[in-house]
Amino acid sequence: MRLLDLHHGIFRHIVPFHAELTALRRDLHAHPELGFEEVRTSARVVEALKLARVDEIHTGIAKTGVVAVIRGRRHDSGRAIGLRCDMDALPMREENDFAWRSTKPGLMHGCGHDGHTTMLVGAARYLAETRRFDGTAYLIFQPGEEGFGGAKAMIDEGLFERFPAQAVYAMHNWPHLPAGHVGVAPGPMMAAADRIEITVTGKGGHGAHPHLAVDPVLVAAHIITAAQSLVSRNVSPFDQAVVSICAMQGGDVGAMSVIPRQVKLVGTVRSFRSQVQDMIEERLGRLVESVAMGLGASATLDYQRIYPATVNSPREAQFAADVAASLVGEDHVVRHLPPSMGAEDFAFMLQVKPGAYLRIGQGREVADSSGFLHSSRYDFNDEILPLGAALFAALVEQAMPLSPH
Ligand SMILES: [Zn+2]
Ligand SMILES: [Zn+2]
């Protein structure tokens, strides 16, 4: 594959341990663990970091989180940067049949965090062996990205007080981007993800005598329709947002003539700017209450903000794109990747530190069944392990260069 033909010095150093990295990645894949339960995973990480001879290993941050400290050949510049990966798997059933498929029923590395962890281990080994930088690298192995807010938990436990990085970088594999490509944007990368729960309360009764009841099913139908006006009529066409009602529950499918008392709607709101997010929360709340009131019922909105938007700082995004271009060539770097409406808890780190979230292409040249993230047939593409490790390492070397003397 083309990646291995590159002549950059980092590759020459990392490629010889590609096989070991692949073995580690497949071992992690075979033993997936849920957020904050990555006990075996973090033990494997610690073992690899010890072998790599990093300077310090700190464990137990946000339960299973690990931070490795690697000091450069010089470290009097006062510079420090953080590199972050996620370690958790998903509560889903794997449908692959290769040898390293999940050994745990109902758990799967369906998002490639096994690969991210391995790439950062690869970077640790390279950086500890070469130390061609002036400053300190903090390698952050984070638990619980998939809905658990592990990044926030680490920050709340003093991550950046203990390891004062001046900027942080993370990367996520991206099946839509060919292997060997890197994508980034100087602003929003992923959306803010909010959870909405609407409870509509009417008055139960007989379906044959609706005038004696207050039908919450009809009210819910109007709310579902009206909610779709928020984005089309309230959000500027130059902003992006999504309102999706994804679940509804009311009545009993076995009871054709019972009007229930209550209906619940559950969904999600995605947005990039906090002004848009605030506006949707406020208007959706008013809309829910007033539609219900107009129809003689009552309704409440429970609006929970899960993850903020993942927004790169422009300077660090451009720097990261330059670093990527130094490895794969300018023609393999997408500098203005359109944002995704998915969400990512690295957002919490970017709220407190400048930095960038990158997408590393993992699409295969031959179409196969590897599938998209969170698909039961997904697998991380081991071919990109050296590139990911090299990219993490190059961020350190180029952010904190040794002075030439
Ligand atoms: Zn995921
Ligand atoms: Zn993920």
Image: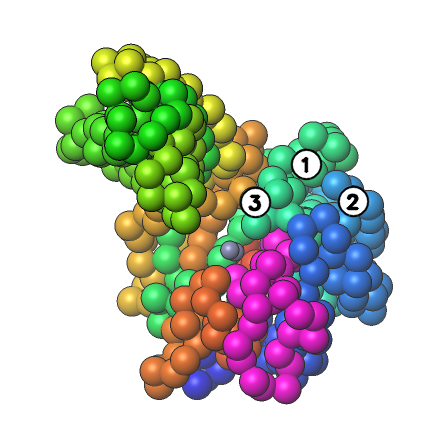
Is residue 235 placed above or below 85 in the rendered structure? above
Of 41 and 184, which appears nearest the observer?
41
Q: In terms of image quadrants, where is residue 353?
A: top right
Q: Which mark is residue 63?
A: 2
Residue 294: x percent and y percent?
23, 14
Residue tagged 3: 147
Q: Which mark is residue 153?
A: 1
Task: Write the start and end of the magenta stretch as one range.
Answer: 84-112
Q: Which mark is residue 344?
A: none
Q: Amino acid at mark 3?
A: Gly
Is residue 48 placed above or below 153 in the rendered structure? below
Describe residue 23's horizontal placement relative to residue 180 as left or right: right
Main secondary structure along the magenta-highlighted residues: loop
For the residue labelled by badge 1, is the local secondary structure a helix, a strand or a loop?
helix
Camera sees residue 303? yes
Describe residue 153's horizontal placement relative to residue 219 as left or right: right
Q: Amino acid at mark 1?
A: Ala
Q: Earlier in the sequence, mark 3 or mark 2?
A: 2
For the residue labelled by badge 2, is the local secondary structure a helix, a strand or a loop?
loop
Label 2: how many Cα within 10 Å (few below 14, some 14–19, many 20+): some
For the residue labelled by badge 3, is the local secondary structure a helix, a strand or a loop?
loop
Is residue 190 placed above or below 364 in the rendered structure? above
Q: Earlier in the sequence, mark 1 or mark 3?
A: 3
Quadrant of the snapshot with the N terminus: bottom left
Q: Residue at x 70, y 70 (%)?
A: 104
Mark 1 in CB contact with mark 3 (< 8 angstroms): no
User: Which of labels 3 and 2 is toward the front?
Assistant: 3
Q: Amino acid at mark 2?
A: Lys
Mark 2 in CB contact with mark 1 (< 8 angstroms): yes
Q: Residue at x 56, y 85 (%)?
A: 97
Describe residue 80's horizontal placement relative to residue 285 as left or right: right
